[in-house]
Each structure stands twice: as C-alpha cells, then as structure tokens.
Amino acid sequence: MVAPHNPEHIFKEKERIGKLSQIREIVFGAQDGLLVPLGVISSVAGAFNNNHIVIVAGVSEALAGAFSMATGAYLASQAEKQVHNAEIARERDAIRNYPKEEKEEMSLLFKREGMGSEDANTIANIMWNYKESFSITMIQKELGIEPDPHKTPVGDAFIVGLSYLIAAGIPLFPYFFLRGEMAIITSIFVTLVALFCIGLLKAKFALLPYLKSGLQVLSVGAGAGIGGYFLGQYLPHLLGIK
C-alpha cells in the first residue's frame, strides 16, 4: 500500500538534502585518512621494520592529520560562507536600489528557462510584491547560492576531522598484531577493502551502481600502499640510511 502524499514534507526536504550532502565531508576525510597514513606507515615499515616506530609514526600522523584536515575544512567552509554572505548582501542591496533592473533580470532568468516573454514579465511583476520570495529566487537563480544553508563550518570541520581519525586507524591496526611484510601486506589489504566500502557508501546515497562506485574509489588509492612500500624500501638506500 502506497503511503499518502503529504505536501508539507517539502519543508523538511532542504534539511534532508543538507544532511545527505555531508557525504562529501565523510568521503573526503575518510579517503585521505586511509591513503595518507597508509603511505607514511608503509614507508616507515619498509625502512625500519620496527613496529614500535611504525605505530608511533602512525598515531602521530593520524592526530596531526585529523587536526590539519579539520582546521582546513573549517577555514575553507568559513571562507566560502563569508563570500556567499557578501554576494547575498550585494544582491539584496541591488534589489532595493535598482528595482526596475532587477525585475528585468528576473524576467530574463525565467525566459532562459524556457518561459514565454509575457508570462516571465507577469510572474516577475507578481513576485516583486513579495520581496523576500523575490530576493530568495534571485539569489538562487542568479548567484546559484542557497540563502539559508544548513551546513556550518564547525560541522564540516568535525565531520572531516573525525572521518580522517577513524579511517587512519584502519591501515595502522595490523601492526599491533603482525610484523614485517605480513603487517605491510595486511595493512594495504584492509585499506583497499575500506576504500571499496567508501565507494559503496557513496553509491548508496548518490544512487550509483555499487560495483562501479566501489571500484572507482578503490582504483584511486590502489597505488598508495604499494608506492609507499617501495618508497620505504629504496629511498633509504638512495639517501644512504641503509
């Protein structure tokens, strides 16, 4: 039986989409949290073959990386928000000071979307009587900005940092139980599995083919562990450490 349609659900859709869009921060933080520590851990393990050194290096990188990613996400999100707020304020000023020109712009925006000239002019004039609706529509259509975003710089920073920190533990944990090449191989394997799972998560929320999405994310990081291992094997020789 199909559930009855409730038109009032539209008031919650923006919030729902805002939460879904956080998948970007999760994937961004988790993918870096897997690949960067894996490269560091693999190179250190290849160079020194000492689990204590590997674990110290891995934990240090995880904490420093999570903090760096979180602060970077905060500053980037804050800068974006500030730029958007400045553009929104500029647009609202233009609406107050240049009403004729702004109504013409609104009409042009409707025409660009395929609306007839007469209808576009009529709707623009009607909307002018409702200034807030007019302003919101202009900001969305002309600037491509959401006037009332649900995401915040602090929220973005928290999600990115936490995702990085959790993911960074995956390539590190085999070194608590295994040693030598077995630890390196296991670390690379579990990291690749985790990358594939991130692709599956992305597919679930983005309605993408599961296998294609999983393999796509996996392929991005497939060379990181191998590259880090060979770097750790040969760089010390090149630098005269071994």
Image (tube, rainbow, N blue to C red):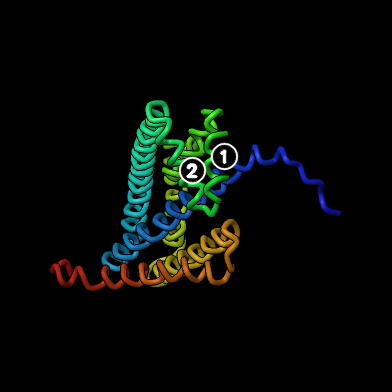
Splitting the image into 4 quarters, where does residue 157 fall?
Answer: top left
**Which amino acid does the dot numbered 1 rest on?**
Ile
Question: Which residue appears farthest toward the left when viewing the image?
Answer: 240
Furthest residue toward top: 96
189 to the left or right of 17: left
Determine which residue is flagged by label 1: 123
- Tell me whether the residue at label 1 lies in contact with that at label 2, contact meaning CB atoms closer than 8 angstroms: yes
Looking at the image, which is closer to me, 76 or 103?
103
Q: Which residue is mark 2?
A: 107
Location of the C terminus (image quadrant): bottom left
- Residue 231 is labelled as none
How many numbered marks have been drawn onto this rendered protein structure? 2
Residue 195 lies, in percent from the top left, at 48, 64
Left or right of 99: which side holds 231? left
Q: Counting residues from the N terminus, which is met first, the one under dot 1 or under dot 2?
A: 2
In depth, the one of 169 and 223 nearer the eye is: 223
Q: Where in the figure is residue 33, as x and y percent of width and height?
A: 41, 54
Q: Is residue 40 above or below residue 77?
A: below
At 52% from the left and 41% from the top, the residue drawn is: 121
